[in-house]
Image: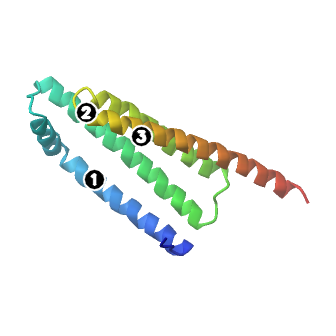
Amino acid sequence: MLRIPKKYSLYLSMVLSIIFFIGCVVGAIGMPALAETLIDVKGAPLAHADFTLVLVLAYLILLSVSLADGLLFWLLMRVRRGLVFTRTSTDLVRGISWCCMLLGALCFGMGWYFRLSLVLAFAALLLGICLRVVKNVLEEASEIKSENELTI
């Protein structure tokens, strides 16, 4: 399996996070056209109120994804400085997990209009649960590190 040196892997993650954020900004600009296209693919015309609701849900989904990406980038910056096992890093993982949970709930709401959103909701909720477990592990490791620092 291809193995990238730790330093390059971290920078690659940061670059991908920035590219993803740029994609979110472009997605925000093109969201009305994208929503219209997806609705046309579905085939059934939506009432204006339904289109507005789909658009609001889509923007909320994009907002939660962008927030998670921002928190992830901040976490990567802390990893670069060696500040992994700290309360702030744990809080960042907690925030990302809550963004995933929110994303799952929003995608579940979008499932009324697009059935594929239900699959995305399931995946987002699973990712949120996995991140909660990682957060708990990171929190425990931070406590152990703090105790070890106090022990001489």
Lower position in the chain sequence, tag 3 or tag 1? 1
Q: Residue at coordinates 13% horizontally, 44% vertically from top-left?
A: 33
Quadrant of the rendered image containing residue 103: top left
Left or right relative to 26: residue 144: right
Lower position in the chain sequence, tag 1 or tag 2? 1
Q: How far separated are the C-alphas under marks 2 and 3?
A: 19 Å
| Proximity of marks 2 and 3: CB atoms separated by less than 8 Å | no
Residue beneath disc 1? 25
Q: Secondary structure at mark 2?
A: helix
Disc on res. 151: none
Disc on res. 56: 2
Residue beneath disc 3? 124
Q: How far separated are the C-alphas under marks 3 and 1?
A: 21 Å
Which quadrant is the C terminus positioned in?
bottom right
Q: Residue at coordinates 13% horizontally, 35% vertically from top-left?
A: 42
Q: Secondary structure at mark 3?
A: helix
